[in-house]
Amino acid sequence: MGVVKSLIPNGNINALTINVYDWFQIAGLQDITNCKDSDKNKDRISITTIKMLNILSKMNVKATFFVPGVVAEKDPEIIKRIHNGGHEIAILGYSNKSISNFTEDEFCREVKSAVEIVEKITGQNIVGYRAPHYSIMPDTVWACEILSKLGLQYDSSIFPVKHDNYGFLSAPRFPFIIDLKKNGKLIEFPLSTIRFLGNNIPIAGGAYLRLLPYWFTRYAIKKLNATGNPAIVYLHPWDLDIDQPHVKLNFALCFKHYGNRLTTEKKLIKLLHDFQFGPIREVLGL
């Protein structure tokens, strides 16, 4: 990954991030036969994103919304609504596919296209990127050089854990700068973990926020903040969607995807009440 050095961001503010894609676009559901053609597969991005925006507005909290280009292209009004709410908009690729699906040239076109679409809608420069499914891993770290070449200033794709679908266990756990030599530098803001019995335990949000008890999430963020490090939390608008359609899944995937959705909104409100949050751009001082 090249020479890295630690970055000391504003440790008093935690980063809140929202990955804006629909419930059927997650890893695991994308591969289910005929899922995309199902009558149940109604587009709920606008409904659930507006719900998320309303909660953030009531709590007076700004966040970073990571948006795929295909979503922005299909529904520019929801992008305008996010932007007009004072939130940061960053890129989640174009097609919401993992980086391993692309060659380097294809990946460059994918990101460039998404940036151009969103910048045209908002009139604001995009500085941040997150790989779909946290797919910057040891064998796809070449993507960092392309992001820097395209003028992006930070990435938030690395999850320093061991996982079946993603993970970069050897990466630093807190924000750091990647020295890309001739291709400049890129700030990396890894997803949050705490150390327990010599292992990195993910506490960053999504299914972890839904399935773990709130006291544990609160404890973990307090522990990070006590050492001067900001936490970074992520959610999807569909994490709050109690009316989300159901499809037949195996037990493990069903539990991971649908579990505890009734409690997520309350957990999010508690989180926003108990800690100070802002967009990544603010936390990193960009």
Image: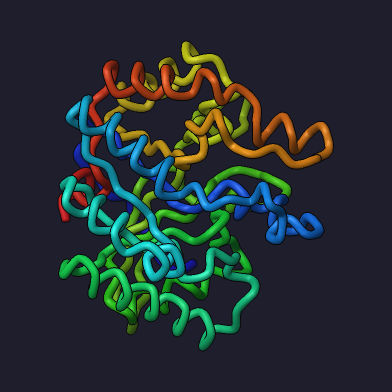
Q: Estimate the x, y position of residue 162 in percent, counting from the top left.
A: 66, 44
Q: Is residue 76 left or right of residue 104?
A: left
Task: Tell me where residue 179 sits by quadrant.
Answer: bottom left
Number of numbered markers: 0
Q: Residue at x 25, y 67 (%)?
A: 126
Q: Residue furthest bottom?
A: 105
Task: Tell me where residue 8 sits by quadrant.
Answer: top left
Q: Residue furthest top?
A: 215
Near-viewer residue (147 or 33): 33
Q: Is residue 110 left or right of residue 39?
A: left
Q: Is residue 145 above or below residue 39?
A: below
Task: Tell me where residue 230 sits by quadrant.
Answer: top left
Q: Estimate the x, y position of residue 254 in percent, counting from the top left.
A: 74, 34
Near-viewer residue (260 or 146): 260
Q: Is residue 61 above or below residue 26?
A: above
Q: Estimate the x, y position of residue 168 in percent, counting from the top left.
A: 58, 53
Near-viewer residue (278 or 163): 278
Q: Residue at x 28, y 57 (%)?
A: 89
Q: Estimate the x, y position of residue 37 in percent, counting from the top left.
A: 71, 60
Q: Residue at x 24, y 51 (%)?
A: 81
